[in-house]
Image: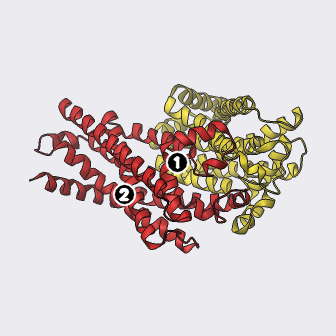
């Protein structure tokens, strides 16, 4: 077990060191959530005047939850890019040879994704509060919201690292991003589910991401609803995708990396 | 060989190179269409806002893919030119009688071709999903000309960045900046319906707003000469400014070699 954690910490430290000392890796992960938040919460704030839009804490808080979950998911995906780079350029081969417990590698990448996302989430939260976001939820509600996002981050990291370890090339980037992008945007992003119409309402009604968003939004407004379903989805995804990632590692081992 | 012949040779190479790279073709077609689908479905209820100019959000938002496609053209043109610099192809060309201006204009032929094909595709998608142009078939022709002009203008900008930096990664780094420019425009709501003063001000000073509004006017309003003049004017200004800057950068780069 000690070997397992020593590998995990070493991998996490290396990834975090790389990310925080390389602006081209750090900045997109920080800038994109802020710019989505600005564009959606700022540019679309009139949307809360649509008849039937009844979110109590205003459009900024409504969009904040989406952007927080999006930053969590993409924080994991961006880490997957690094995993792919490690495999493509041969570092992973040395890592596999040197690691006494290789499963620690998967945990290490996931820990790095979380460390990276925590910085993004902190900056995003500070900006949201600075522009006057209303928060109706209590401290416990907010802890639950960030915990929910943490599981989304882990799910994103496990998904992307699983893809990266199977395909072992940075060209796999779109394969990591596109499903996450679609899962996020085929949900009630701009308005509540009740205001969606047509095909998107049908898709969003069965999209698990909808439960994450609705749970998160109810937490920030202090009237928790669907939270248990949201957590069930988040934990379920993180668990299933950790298996996906672990099997990706095995696939890389079989390929002789 | 005269200048026109030189442009023709480089243009042929640029078009073939664009056509032979699936990533250059697929992303400009898939991503803007996917965003059109999710955003127009997600924000359909925004048409209920008092003063919204049409009752079809998909018609309102159809201008977006034309602009996003043009941004992809920027990346393609810039990345291809940067690759020529990094691989030493430009240095070899510098030993020939090829004129710098001919190289830039020839490179933009690939962008213009892709921009034209993209525009026809986005228009066809719009027509298939039920959008009817208020300006009729003549408006469709003007729409394609305007969209292709915008692609060439952004392509010239990409070429300038490529020549200044000589790095494909640096050109790719420009994409988030342009994407921010796109999102901080009137792409989601008309400027008079943007509630936040600062956002409306940014959108008013943002040339991309006028490019979008010119395209949009042909789709939902008919013949709005002021919107069209502004759109063609800004496209021409970006194209002329970027071509001038690219020619200057090309002179410097050829001097260095």
The one nearer the camera, B87 or B174, is: B174
- Which colour is chain B painted? red
Q: Residue A253: horizontal and vertical position, in percent?
A: 55, 48
Q: Which quadrant holds residue B174? A: top left
Q: Is residue B253 above or below residue A230?
A: above
For label 2, the SS is loop
Same chain for mark 1 and mark 2? The answer is yes
User: The C terminus of chain B is located in which quarter?
Assistant: top left
Which residue is located at x 53 percent, y 56 percent?
B64
Q: Would residue A208 appear left or right of B64 to someone viewing this image?
A: right
Q: Is residue A251 above or below residue A79?
A: below
Q: Residue A205: horizontal and vertical position, in percent?
A: 77, 63
Query: Is residue B125 visible to us here?
Result: yes
Q: Are marks 1 and 2 in contact (CB under 8 Å)?
A: no
Q: Residue B242: horizontal and vertical position, in percent?
A: 34, 41
Chain letter behind tag 2: B
The one nearer the camera, A51 or A233, is: A51
Query: Is residue A102 visible to us here?
Result: no
Q: Earlier in the sequence, mark 1 or mark 2?
A: 2
Q: Which quadrant holds residue B238? A: top left
Q: Which residue is mark 1?
A: B209
Q: Residue A92: horizontal and vertical position, in percent?
A: 51, 39
Residue B21: which numbered mark, if any?
A: 2
- Which colour is chain A painted? yellow
- Label 2 CA crowd tier, 10 Å (few <14, some 14–19, many 20+): few
- Label 1 CA crowd tier, 10 Å (few <14, some 14–19, many 20+): many
| Cα distance in 3D space between marks 1 and 2 | 31 Å
Q: Which quadrant holds residue A124? A: top right
Chain letter behind tag 1: B
């Amino acid at each position: 077990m000690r070997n397992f954690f020593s590998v995990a910490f070493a991998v996490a430290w290396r990834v975090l060191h790389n990310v925080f000392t390389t602006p081209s890796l750090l900045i997109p992960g920080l800038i994109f959530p802020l710019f989505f938040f600005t564009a959606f919460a700022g540019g679309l704030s009139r949307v809360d005047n649509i008849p039937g839009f009844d979110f109590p804490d205003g459009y900024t808080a409504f969009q904040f939850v989406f952007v927080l979950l999006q930053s969590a998911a993409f924080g994991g995906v961006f880490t997957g890019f690094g995993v792919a780079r490690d495999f493509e350029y041969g570092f992973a081969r040395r890592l596999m040879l040197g690691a006494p417990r290789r499963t620690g590698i998967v945990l290490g990448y996931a820990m790095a994704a979380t460390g990276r996302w925590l910085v993004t989430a902190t900056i995003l939260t500070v900006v949201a509060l600075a522009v006057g976001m209303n928060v109706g939820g209590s401290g416990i509600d907010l802890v639950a919201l960030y915990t929910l996002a943490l599981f989304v981050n882990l799910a994103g990291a496990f998904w992307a690292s699983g893809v990266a370890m199977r395909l072992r090339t940075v060209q796999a980037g779109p394969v990591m991003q596109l499903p996450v992008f679609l899962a996020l945007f085929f949900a009630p992003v701009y308005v509540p589910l009740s205001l969606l119409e047509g095909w998107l309402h049908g898709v969003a009604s069965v999209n698990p991401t909808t439960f994450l968003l609705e749970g998160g939004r109810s937490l920030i407004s202090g009237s928790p609803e669907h939270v248990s379903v949201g957590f069930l989805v988040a934990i379920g995804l993180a668990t299933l995708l950790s298996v996906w990632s672990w099997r990706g590692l095995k696939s890389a081992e079989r390929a002789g990396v | 060989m005269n200048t026109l012949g030189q442009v023709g040779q480089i243009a042929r190479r640029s078009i073939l190179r664009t056509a032979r790279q699936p990533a250059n073709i697929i992303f400009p077609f898939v991503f803007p269409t996917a965003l059109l689908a999710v955003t127009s479905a997600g924000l359909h209820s925004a048409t209920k806002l008092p003063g919204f100019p049409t009752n079809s959000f998909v018609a309102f938002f159809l201008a977006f893919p034309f602009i996003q496609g043009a941004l992809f053209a920027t990346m393609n043109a810039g990345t291809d030119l940067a690759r020529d610099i990094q691989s030493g192809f430009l240095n070899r060309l510098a030993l020939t009688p090829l004129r710098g201006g001919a190289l830039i204009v020839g490179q933009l032929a690939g962008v213009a071709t892709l921009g034209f094909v993209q525009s026809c595709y986005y228009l066809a998608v719009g027509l298939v999903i039920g959008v009817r142009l208020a300006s009729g078939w003549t408006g469709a022709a003007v729409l394609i000309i305007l969209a292709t002009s915008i692609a060439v203008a952004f392509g010239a900008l990409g070429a300038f960045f490529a020549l200044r930096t000589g790095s494909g990664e640096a050109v790719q780094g420009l994409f988030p900046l342009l994407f921010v420019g796109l999102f901080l425009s009137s792409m989601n709501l008309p400027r008079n319906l943007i509630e936040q003063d600062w956002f409306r001000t940014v959108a008013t000073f943002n040339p991309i707003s006028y490019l979008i509004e010119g395209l949009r006017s042909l789709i939902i309003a008919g013949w709005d000469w002021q919107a069209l003049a502004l759109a063609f004017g800004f496209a021409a200004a970006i194209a002329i400014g970027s071509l001038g800057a690219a020619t200057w950068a090309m002179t410097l780069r050829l001097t260095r070699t």
